[in-house]
Amino acid sequence: MFLYTGAVKALHPADFLKLLHEYNFASHPLLLNLVATTLPWAEVFCGGLLLLGVAVRGTALLLLLQLAAFTVAVSGRALAIQAAGGLPFCAIRFDCGCGVGEVNICGKLLENGFLILLAALLLVVRADKWALRHDIARPCRSSSLISPRPS
């Protein structure tokens, strides 16, 4: 998921920058440009690391922090839309900047909650057996591959 959504944002940084403007979290254009150009690639990189099973716990921690911050930002924006328009919270739909277009806010918050739970799970369990790396590079358990030196 992070590979896909990060790639969509990375390939269209101007569109992602426009969506970031709607959150009003930073007024300095340099900071917004930096986030719009680096955050998508960080997502792609983290998604690749998780898929390969490399630095799983560290990657899960980074994604957990990103997801938590994003969830707070999306919730705040949805609450502002609700206050301005008087819509029921779960009826609110907007493009949150996640790379998949317009989403229902309640569905997005549930999805983020699930991803946060998965990232937290990766922090506490041994995750390498579920990784692609585990299937590709299994350690050799046989000592017969090492031949003794002749005397």
Image (tube, rainbow, N blue to C red):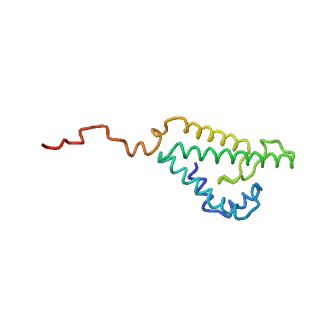
Q: Which residue is farthest left?
A: 151
127 sits to left or right of 38: left
Q: Between 129 and 100, which is closer to the camera in this rendering?
A: 129
Q: Position of residue 16 (x, y in %)?
A: 68, 59
For image coordinates 63% across by 39% down, the residue present is 114
Specify the quadrant of the image occupied by residue 38. bottom right
The front one of 24 and 100 is 24
The one of 36 and 14 positioned closer to us in this rendering: 36
Q: State left or right for residue 138 relative to residue 53.
A: left
Q: Quadrant of residue 18?
A: bottom right
| Left or right: 147 in relation to 3 | left
The total number of labels drawn is: 0
Q: Quadrant of residue 68?
A: top right
Pinpoint residue 42: horizontal percent, then vertical percent. 58, 55
Q: Where in the figure is residue 83, as x and y percent of width and height?
A: 86, 46
Rendered residue at 62%/41% (across/down): 115
Horizontal and vertical percent position of residue 150: 14, 43
* Residue at (58% x, 44% y) in the render: 61
Image quarter where the C terminus lies is top left
Q: Residue furthest front?
A: 151
Farthest residue to the top: give it.
125
